[in-house]
Image: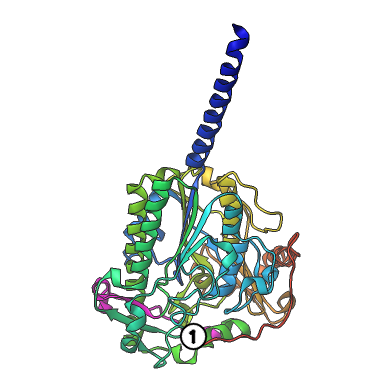
């Protein structure tokens, strides 16, 4: 009798084992954290949650209440292409060998494993909506720009009426929009704009993942507030030009900084000493574009909650670098001042225990890669240079790193909790800058020539040189192809 039951028992055992394994696999798929990576283009920290008195950013502000807001996060290069290549690979620009726009990452690091590629390799479905790698804006809107196809399972290239309305856009350089101040208070609705379309696509994909219960890494790259500053005109009406404050620069200021720093502020000749009316209009348009982008972020986050995915999805919100809006007499990016290096960074979701808190310790964008890997229980490749910010996400008073490094042209700069120290040329031979953020958060008083700061400068110089050496180490297992990449494409 026992023998006759044996095949039945064996069959039942196999079935039980099958259902147990299936259940465990399903459970693993449902509990593996998803990642929603949200990034704006050319967005500085002019946001409500960062203390700006005018800019309305209610959806980003709400996200900050749900996660950790990094007060001192910095890009590694204040320009779209190098910055995006850097954080997507977890490598410094001197390691990716990308120091300007219009470069495909695998031209210089062909076998690098990008952040989203790592997620793909661990069974995640990786989707790109809009701009993640470099695009020439607005010329590349609706195309893949300088995207990396190995990074994604699926990509979307939204294109809205902002592209068709180019002939209506005001520009300081007529016919040029991406590299100069330009703006338009547009007719029509949010949904007709490229970023409105991107939000709709992201929402559709979130609903799809919710139904299929598939782990995902979704990156949504909004184009605003990159020039041209285009948003429906109701957003412009939120910021009357008469109430806009234009930063003022004291006479003789440029003589207090090194020649390379001065050159960085004067590189766009038609944007120097803007008339007050134009300056107010430019700032108004920039603020309008931020609030428009915030509204699209809000739609995406609302869908995340409505689908129930918010309970198991890590949300990262950031920008690719900072931005000047008249500070130091300069507009746009590409300087080594706080305005161009400082980026917004908010991380919320599973594993983030310090909800609603602010982290004061420095963070770098190369930290995204190891941080998300650890939060999702994945092993990041040995090549990456960033550090995990998970300790800070658990305890906002914890410091995951002591300094943040940014480079531009022949200059390198570090930010400590109290100081910014910059050297131009080898070992600072072309000039040095030192700013005390305790007394001079606007970085308008260069202390590098003050004899009383010599000891401090020597200490910071040693730290900076060590950081530069670290940023130039050959990444483990990554092939580097060094050549002069001369490609130029129209903006």
Lateral position of residue 26 relative to residue 95, left or right:
left
Please count the marks in the image: 1
Colour scheme in the image?
A: rainbow
Find the residue positioned furthest to the top.
Answer: 1
Image coordinates for residue 462, horizontal then vertical, percent? 73, 64
Check the image and report above or below for 2 versus 262: above
Find out whether residue 250 is within the magenta segment: yes
Image coordinates for residue 450, horizontal then vertical, percent? 64, 74
Res 395 visible: no
Q: Place residue 405 in its image quadrant.
A: bottom right
Q: Residue at x 54, y 37 (%)?
A: 25
Res 205 visible: yes
Lateral position of residue 294 relative to residue 150, left or right:
left
Question: In this picture, which residue range is highlighted in magenta?
Answer: 228-254
Check the image and report above or below for 17 versus 223: above
Residue labelled with disc 1? 491
Quadrant showing the N terminus: top right
Image coordinates for residue 303, horizontal then vertical, percent? 34, 53
* Secondary-structure class at tag 1: loop
Q: Residue at x 60, y 68 (%)?
A: 85
Q: Residue at x 56, y 68 (%)?
A: 84
Please state which of residues 55 and 139 is positioned toward the viewer in this rendering.
Answer: 139
């Amino acid at each position: 009798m026992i023998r006759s039951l044996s095949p039945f028992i064996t069959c039942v055992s196999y079935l039980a084992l099958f259902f147990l394994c299936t259940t465990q696999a399903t459970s693993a798929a449902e509990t593996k954290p998803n990642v929603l990576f949200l990034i704006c283009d050319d967005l500085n920290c002019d946001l409500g949650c960062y203390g700006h008195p005018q800019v309305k950013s209610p959806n980003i502000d709400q996200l900050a209440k749900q996660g950790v807001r990094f007060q001192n996060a910095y890009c590694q290069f204040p320009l779209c292409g190098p910055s995006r290549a850097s954080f997507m690979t977890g490598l410094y620009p001197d390691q990716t060998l990308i120091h300007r726009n219009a470069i495909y990452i695998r031209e210089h690091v062909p076998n690098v494993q990008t952040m989203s590629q790592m997620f793909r390799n661990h069974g995640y479905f990786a989707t790109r909506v809009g701009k993640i790698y470099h695009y020439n804006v607005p010329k590349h809107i609706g195309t893949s720009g300088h995207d990396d196809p190995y990074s994604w399972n699926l990509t979307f290239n939204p294109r809205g009426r902002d592209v068709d309305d180019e002939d209506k856009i005001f520009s300081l350089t007529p016919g040029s929009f991406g590299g100069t101040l330009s703006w338009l208070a547009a007719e029509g609705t949010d949904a007709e704009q490229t970023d409105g379309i991107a939000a709709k696509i992201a929402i559709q994909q979130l609903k799809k993942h919710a139904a299929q219960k598939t782990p995902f890494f979704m990156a949504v790259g909004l184009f605003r507030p990159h020039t041209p500053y285009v948003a429906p005109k109701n957003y412009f009406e939120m910021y009357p030009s008469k109430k806009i404050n234009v930063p003022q620069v004291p006479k003789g200021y440029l003589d207090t900084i090194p020649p390379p720093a001065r050159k960085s502020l004067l590189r766009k000749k038609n944007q120097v000493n803007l008339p007050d009316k134009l300056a107010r209009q430019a700032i108004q348009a920039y603020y309008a574009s931020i609030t428009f982008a915030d509204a699209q972020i809000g739609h995406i986050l609302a869908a995340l909650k409505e689908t129930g995915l918010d309970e198991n999805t890590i949300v990262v919100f950031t920008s690719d670098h900072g931005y000047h809006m008249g500070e130091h007499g300069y507009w746009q990016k590409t300087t080594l001042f706080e305005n161009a290096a400082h980026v917004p960074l908010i991380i919320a979701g599973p594993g983030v225990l310090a909800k609603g808190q602010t982290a004061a310790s420095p963070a770098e964008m190369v930290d995204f890669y190891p941080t998300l890997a650890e939060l999702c229980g994945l092993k990041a490749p040995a090549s990456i240079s960033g550090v995990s910010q998970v300790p800070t996400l658990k305890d906002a008073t914890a410091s995951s790193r002591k300094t943040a490094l940014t480079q531009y042209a022949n200059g390198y700069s570090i930010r400590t909790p109290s100081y910014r120290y910059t050297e131009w040329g080898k070992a600072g031979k072309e000039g040095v800058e030192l700013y005390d953020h305790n007394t001079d958060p606007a970085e308008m008083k260069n202390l590098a020539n003050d004899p009383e700061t010599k000891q401090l400068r020597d200490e910071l110089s040693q730290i900076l040189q060590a950081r530069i050496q670290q940023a130039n180490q050959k990444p483990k297992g990554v092939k580097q192809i060094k050549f002069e990449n001369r490609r130029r494409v129209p903006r």
